[in-house]
Amino acid sequence: TATVQFPLHTAVREFLSGPHGLLIGGEWVPAASGRTFPTYDPATGEKITDVAHGEAEDVDRAVAAARKAFEEGPWARMKPNERERLIWRVGDLLSERAEIFGQLEALDNGKSAMIAQVVDTEWAADVFRYYAGWATKIEGSTVNVSMPFVPDGQFHAYTLREPVGVCGQIIPWNFPLLMASWKIAPALAAGNTVVLKPAEQTPLTALLLGQLFEEAGFPPGVVNVVTGFGDAGAAIAAHDGVDKVAFTGSTEVGKKIVDAAKGNLKKVSLELGGKSPNVVFADADFDIAVPGSVNAWLFNHGQCCVAGTRLFVEDKIFDEFTQAVAEAAAQVKIGPGLDPATQLGPMVSQEQFDRVSRYLSEGLADGARALTGGKPWGERGYFIEPTVFVDVRPEFSIVREEIFGPVVAALPFNAEQGVEAAANNSEYGLAAGVWTRDVSKAHRTAKALKAGSVWVNQYNGFDTAMPFGGYKQSGWGRELGAAALDLYTQTKAVNIAL
Ligand code: ADP
């Protein structure tokens, strides 16, 4: 197995050997039903370990613990600078143990351990430290009120920004630890308490992260972790004791979250799917646009909500550019995430492997031509070859639908006719890339694209301080940056007659 071939850190072994309970009210407890479920190594298909199978009853317990911590516990009375110190400590602990988290993530998710260490874990640490800084900087304002219907009155009016309360947070399997940090850190900075449900495919790093809150000195019940399946997520979304639900995942499930949240009209934020356009003009710098466009759709094995999977290339350079992209993609080293040489790991699960394989067949049946790839790779594990499709039409499923695998569809465009309409022809609007040496063209195109993030002469240009979220059916609200604090605070207007 991968475990034998690539030796694991002692701390990873120790973690894997222990029981994996739910974190509720500061205790590690089994599921109320006593049930567990297995999590698998996608590079081999073999079981890694079992974790507690949380269900509605466990969600009830976790919500009660989060409520108690929010209303009564030391957390409710804690000063912002004390919250700051605790949140910062989690960031530092993550950095100290980045190698351990990286390996565990690689094992559970399939991604490269090196990337999981340097990108997923160190960035998660950065997110905790960034929001630690915000804890002391969340401010209301004083307001110059006129109150024309009280002509003689004198007033002192101001706003308070208060936490929303108990936040339910449901995350996907593509960046398990990182998504946990995006959700938990701003919620804590604003003084909320949290019930986190990791994805059933990748529960492990969220559990290891759960240990850090204890170690950092968080009061019990501030962060609760319930591992389980969609039904546990649905229980969170529908729970009357939850004040806000934050979800990252598919657009399909996002709509179910909105439905479920209706009961108590809890606040909802959503980060959903994408089918992002990556636009390459003929004047682009080839040397950066080729590797950049490969990174745009191949990073994390194409399992990115922002993946630039509709590659629009100006017709003058279409053949040359797509050929270069296909050649670069064909050279990518495929293998298990724990192999230091690996650049492209397996799909996260059998289900995801089947789904991507189905899209490959559909694309070929529709008449698309694969410049490279087009099929699964290797004897075992859930590997798919990087695939570049040309000869595609806008109505093909591989052009319209989110595949979440290493598959890109390339479409030529004519600069005179413009590319914006074609690029915007999607129900999604998460991200977009633009490659050009012409600064005016870059700004014009960035403005015309209907997407929450636009990256020019780079792709995946994320930063903790930059707001991130979707136009159209890619989501509601913005995470990261100061914007995330809007999701986790509510404003109270106080007006005092003097
Ligand atoms: P993906 O398609 O990327 O697997 P999903 O949207 O299915 O993403 O899953 C993302 C997260 O949502 C996971 O934690 C999953 O367990 C959870 N989930 C799935 N179905 C539901 C549901 N009906 N209500 C709430 N959460 C759900």
Image (cartoon, helix red, strand yellow):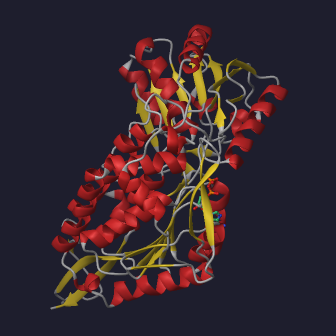
Q: Residue at x 63, y 82 (%)?
A: 33
Q: Residue at x 21, y 60 (%)?
A: 133
Residue 30: where, in percent of width, then height?
A: 53, 79
**Residue 32 located left or right of residue 225:** right
| Residue reaching furthest to the front | 4
Residue 285: where, in percent of width, then height?
A: 41, 13
Residue 349: where, in percent of width, then height?
A: 65, 48
The front one of 6 and 480 is 6
Residue 223, quarter of the rendered image: bottom left
Q: Quadrant of the N terminus?
A: top right
Residue 486, quarter of the rendered image: bottom left
Does any portion of residue 241 appear in the rendered image? no
Does any portion of residue 201 appear in the rendered image? yes
Residue 270 to residue 394: above or below: below
Residue 397 to residue 77: above or below: above
Residue 437 to residue 90: above or below: above
| Residue reaching furthest to the right | 365
How many badges with numbers are in the image?
0
**Residue 193 located left or right of residue 338:** left
Residue 179: where, in percent of width, then height?
A: 45, 55
The front one of 224 and 214 is 214
Q: Quadrant of the C terminus?
A: bottom left
Q: Which quarter of the rendered image does ligand 1 occupy?
A: bottom right
